[in-house]
Image (spheres, helix red, strand yellow):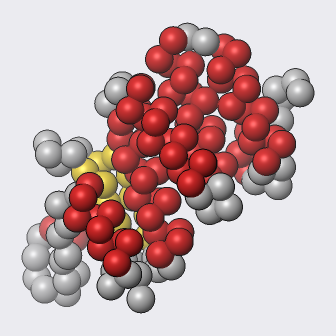
Amino acid sequence: MTYPDAAVADFINNNFIPLQINVQSGSELPGKYRVFWTPTILILNSQDTEYYRFNGFLPPDEFIPQLQFGLGKMSLEMQNFKTASSRLKLVVDKYPRSDIAPEAQYWFGVSEYRAAHNVDALLSAWRKIKKDYPNSIWAKKVSYVKD
């Protein structure tokens, strides 16, 4: 259902080098990457460093935002803050009702702060979480921020 979806296939082909491994094939890769449940989606860089993972089935309308978020987190951790901000904002803007959107908004604020040390940008992003995603765990994480 998810992988045959044209939008999913296009997103993967345009942004990743996909690799599918049968965990019962005798390959050493499941152990190397700590895969204990399927599907396990890993986002790695070309040096084999893991930046994001998620497990279990997701429908296409949740799968693509998760992948986009993973790219944003990878950019953030690589300290490419401008790219991280762009990718994380895209998740929030294009998929505002996805389950990953509140977390994307949180890390968007962090990337904006890290790019320019602009506390107002950080607080503004976090206030948006409280307003748009009040029941999320991410709203709890920023609950101390004044409105």
**x 36%, y 25%: residue:** 79
Q: From the viewer's perspective, tell me whether residue 98 is left or right of residue 58.
A: right
Q: From the viewer's perspective, tell me whether residue 137 is left or right of residue 61.
A: right
Quarter the N terminus occupies: bottom left
**x 71%, y 45%: residue:** 138
User: Relative to 91, does residue 111 appear above or below in the rendering?
Assistant: above
User: Relative to 124, does residue 10 appear above or below in the rendering?
Assistant: below
> Is residue 35 shown to the viewer in this render?
no
**x 38%, y 72%: residue:** 7
Quarter the C terminus occupies: top right
Q: Quarter of the image holding residue 54?
A: bottom left
> Is residue 7 shown to the viewer in this render?
yes
Give residue 16's position: percent from left, percent from top.
23, 58
User: Relative to 30, does residue 16 appear above or below in the rendering?
Assistant: above
Give residue 30's position: percent from left, percent from top.
22, 70
Most distant residue in the top direction: 117
Give residue 49's position: percent from left, percent from top.
23, 44
Along the line of sight, which residue is nearer the eye, 58 or 85? 85
